[in-house]
Each structure stands twice: as structure tokens, then as C-alpha cells.
Image (cartoon, grey):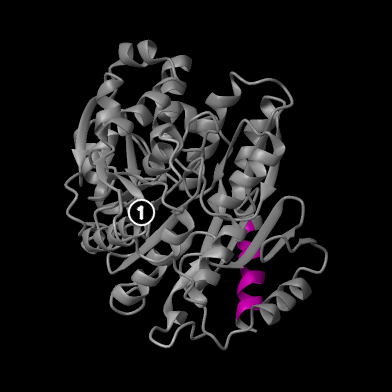
Amino acid sequence: MRISREYDLSRLMISISGVRGKIANGLGLGEALLFSQSFATMMEQGTVVIGRDSRPSGPYLEHLLTSALLANGSSILNLGLVPTPTTKAVVNLAKARGGIMISASHNPMEWNAFKFISKGGFFFNAKENETLLNLLKHSQFAPEIIHPKSYVESGEDYIDLHIKSVLSRVNVPKIKKKKFKVFVDAVGGAGSYVIPALLRTLGCQVIEHNCKPDGTFPRPPEPTPAALKSVEKHFKKSKAEIGFALDPDADRLVLFTPKRGAISEELTLPLVLKNVLSDSKKGSKVVVNLSTSFLNEHVAETFGAKVIRSKVGEANVVEEMIAEKAVFGGEGNGGVIDPKIPSFGRDTLSGIAHILNLMAEEKKTIDELVSELPSIHMDKQSFPLSKEYSLNDLYDKFVSGFGRATISKKDGLWLSEGDTWIHIRPSNTEPIFRVIAEAKSEAKLKETLKRVQTCVES
């Protein structure tokens, strides 16, 4: 779809997660300027927070965005290189009009993105995204101010406030007493400084790996066990008691354990959930997305809590958490959401602190805590999504192939057969569709995957 005479935005991924694309082949200077002007118009001369990850394209996109905001009379709190949750937290703490995170999260280095943040530190909802796109489509940008009184200042002090808010949720003296030896792989991204600083504040001995934020991403940026195979030997050599791996903007968290190495990203959420629910009332509500593991229901049932499933996407999970007054939430990709922390979104600082607190309170190793959870039997696949491909036709094949399943079309197609579920949906961040399946036994998962393959190939 051609939105303006000059720029074709069809190569961009525009979704609830913001706008992202490949530099010079999608998100070029022209496209970035259009989105910057639309965003600046929505900010109405308020204070705006800007953060970015370590991608080489980050600085020039930051300056472009800064120029558009200053021209419209907004003032800027510039955080520089920080995690996405820190940017969100500072928007909240500084009572800013809004904010923007320049990061394509787990996408490769040649990608970048704008993640739009509204008042209170929440990502733009569907209505706000629609407003931004309408401004862009019709070129309804606010005129430049001849004598702007806007300014740029550092928001470094607010970064410390984010760390303090995380510390307030855990027993700091008890964690400090343990003097944990902790390994951190920040993939050369936005968590390279903040995460080691948090850990040292908690009295940990920190072994830093890939913590030079040069934006080259020395391993695949999405922190899955497969992507972390090359890092495992460094973790084991360190003799650390636990390890944490991040994505480039530090909103996804994956663990290393001494016995298992890198473990599934799906284990992060139930471990943190156990720590949160240990101090929550019976009957509390937890929100996870449709693609997240059964393990969270297992932990919730232990504490008499209820799990509610939302659409995929941090903004969707948060919206459901607010509506349900949930005490906790998150996504199975390693995204931990604690509503009592001002980022109120996926936050690796929060996840790290809660897991160390669980180890300290229960006096158990991370391997012991993982062994207490049921085994996970899940498979995640992705397939190219061409413009000619009909997702509705694919959904029909799955409905026929799983004729006895309970169906939900809340987000793509979700099919449940009691001890098994399958979720098929287009990605918010890449031109692919995902098929995720989970079963409560390895045999059942293998049987389910054969049926999935038949549906995809037919």
C-alpha cells in the first residue's frame, strides 16, 4: 500500500509492536522522518523520553527523531543506550507525555524500529497506532515552531530510579547474603551496562559476556537455547551459579543452569511467577498470552491463582492485566511483567531480581527449582509469509485436521484438545507465520507435530 507520493511503506512491519523494517530497504531516512513527524504531532509539545539499543543505525534515527520533536516544541529526556523496559519506566517516573524506544528487539542487526510509548509508560494501543498512521497518511503534521523553547537533557538519574523500583520488589539483604556468582550475556545490546549494575547492587559477583555494546550481535539476537549453544561453554567455564541471556533491547530473559546449560525461554515465566505468587492472595489473577506454556497454569494452581490468556504482544497482555487487575503477567518468550514496577511491561531487570530472590528465599539452586517443574514438551516453528499466502485457507486446514478441538479466534487460530494446544498466527515483528504446539507428553507432541505438518503441506 502506497501511503504517500514519496515513500512506499509496504516493506515495513506495522503492528501493535510499533513499526520496524530493514535500514535502507524499508525503514530509510524518509520513512523514519514521516513516523517521527507523526509521533511528534501526537506529543503536543510535551516532554518525551528517548532510548535506544546498540544498533549502528540507532544514533542517526535518534537524532532524526530529536529534530522532529524539537521542531514541534517538545522537550526531550535522552537516556542513550538503555533497555526497552527502562525507557518505559522513565516515561512513567518522569510523568512524560510519551516516549519512544529505537530498537528492533530480537531482529537481526540490519533491522531497526520505533516502539511508541504513551503517557504512563504503556506501549501505544490499537487506537493510538491508528491515530499515528492517519496523521502520516494525510500528512497532518504540526507546523514547526519558529521560536521553540524546547530542550534536551540527560535522563540518567531516572535510570537509577528504575533499578530502585526493581529492588523494592525483592529481599535485597537476603540476596546480598548469598553472594551469587552470576553470568550475563547481553548480546552486545542495551542491557550491557544496566544489568551488571543491578546485579552488583544485589551483591553478586558478575561475569560479563558479550557486554560491549557495539551493536554487532556476536550470536543470534533472539535468546533461544539453540542460539545460545556457542555461549554455553563460556558459562560452564565461569563456574557461575546461574546465567542470564538477553535480547538486544533487554526485554526477553533466558536462563543458564550449571547442569542443563541454556534452558527453554518458557521456563523463565513460571519461575518468576512462583516467587510473585508466594506473596500474593489466593484467587489472584495472572495473564499470559495464547502461545505460552501450560507450566504457568501448573504454578498458578499450586497457589490457588487463575491464569487468563490474552492475544500475543506485550501491549495486549498489559491491557488484559489492567482489565483483570492481575498480580503478574508475561509471555513465554522470556517476557516478565510485574505491574508493581513502573515499566509495566516485559522487563529483564524484574525477572532477574525475582529469580535470585526465589533462590535466596527457598535456599535452592536454580537446577533444583527447575527440576520441581513438570517437563516441557513444546515446539515452535515458523514459515515464510508471502503476500499471496492465504492464512484463512491455512486456518481452514487446521480446523479440518483437528476436528475435535476447541477453537478460539482471539488471535489467529488457537486449537485445544485438553492436554494439547496449537497456535497459528502471523508474526507481529517478522514476515512469517508461527505455529506453536504444546503437549503434556513427548509422544503426544510428536503425534501432534505430524498432524501440523500435514496441515501446512497439504
* Principal secondary structure, stretch drawn in magenta: helix
**Label 1 neighbour load within 10 Å: few <14, some 14-19, many 20+:** many
**121 left or right of 295 in image:** left
Looking at the rendered structure, the kind of residue marked 1 is Gly
Q: Residue furthest front?
A: 147
Q: Which residue is tagged 1?
A: 73
Where residue 369 appears, as percent x and y from the top left, is 48, 28
**207 left or right of 195 in image:** left
Instruction: Give me the residue at 60% from left, 82% from top.
Output: 457
Q: Find numbered disc 1 in the image and state the secondary structure of the residue it sits on.
A: loop
Magenta region includes residue 455: yes
**80 left or right of 326 in image:** left
Instruction: Give me the residue at 37% from left, 63% from top.
Output: 113
The answer to whether any part of residue 313 appears in the image is yes
Q: Residue furthest right?
A: 404
Q: Which residues are magenta?
A: 445-456
Instruction: Give me the residue at 52% from left, 79% from top.
Output: 385
Instruction: Give me the residue at 51% from left, 50% from top.
Output: 123
Magenta region includes residue 452: yes
Q: Is residue 170 above or below residue 117?
A: above
Where residue 304 appears, as percent x and y from the top left, is 72, 26
- In which quarter of the view is residue 55 placed? bottom left
The foreground one among 247 and 380 is 247
